[in-house]
Image: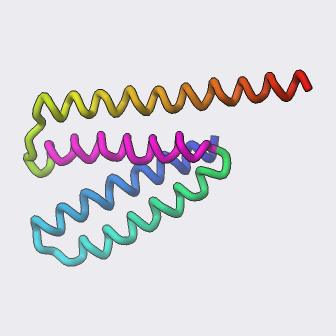
Amino acid sequence: MIYWLLLALAIAFEITGTLLMKWSGVSGNPLGYFLMLLMIALSYITLSFSIKKIALGVAYAMWEGIGILFITLFSVLLFEESLSLTKLLGLTTLVVGIALIKSGTRAAKKTVEVQHAGV
């Protein structure tokens, strides 16, 4: 359970860091770039701890995919960026892809467990 919490923190740090990058560019405040670097570093550190028990493909897909989803949504809300039908379709496809990667990893793990139990 702690590894999933670490993954959630990695995602939150990534989202925050990326939004700070945009905010710094728009506002011209250089402090945002320092905070962005800190958040991105924390994101990679917590991601690296989470993959000790979570499959790398699953963790990375969730980290990147959920990050993109929330960054896009927050960009629309905070920076008045557009949200087209094409973007919505892309985000929907992204969520479906993450779910398929996660369920495929779970199915593969069960297959390996069954094969080892029979040996």
> What segment is highlighted magenta in the picture?
54-77
State the residue at coordinates (8%, 41%): 82
Is residue 74 found left or right of 81 in the rendered image?
right
**Colour scheme in use:** rainbow
Query: Per the image, is 83 magenta?
Result: no
Q: Is residue 81 left or right of residue 47?
A: left
Residue 60: percent from left, percent from top: 48, 47
**For the point 55% across and 50% down, which residue is it?**
6
**Residue 5 in which image quadrant:** top right
Question: x, y percentage for residue 62?
Answer: 45, 41
Q: Please, is residue 26 above or below residue 91 in the view? A: below
- Asked whether residue 76 is drawn in magenta, I would say yes
Q: Quadrant of the C terminus?
A: top right
| Residue appearing at x 46%, y 28% in the figure | 99
Left or right: 58 in relation to 75: right
Q: In the rendered image of this protein, does residue 35 appear above or below residue 71?
A: below
Q: x and y percent of residue 36 in the render? A: 31, 67
Dominant SS in magenta: helix
Q: Is residue 57 shown above or below 42?
A: above
Residue 14 vs residue 44: left or right? left
* Image quadrant containing the N terminus: top right
Name the residue: 11% across, 73% down: 28
Residue 21: x and y in percent read 23, 64
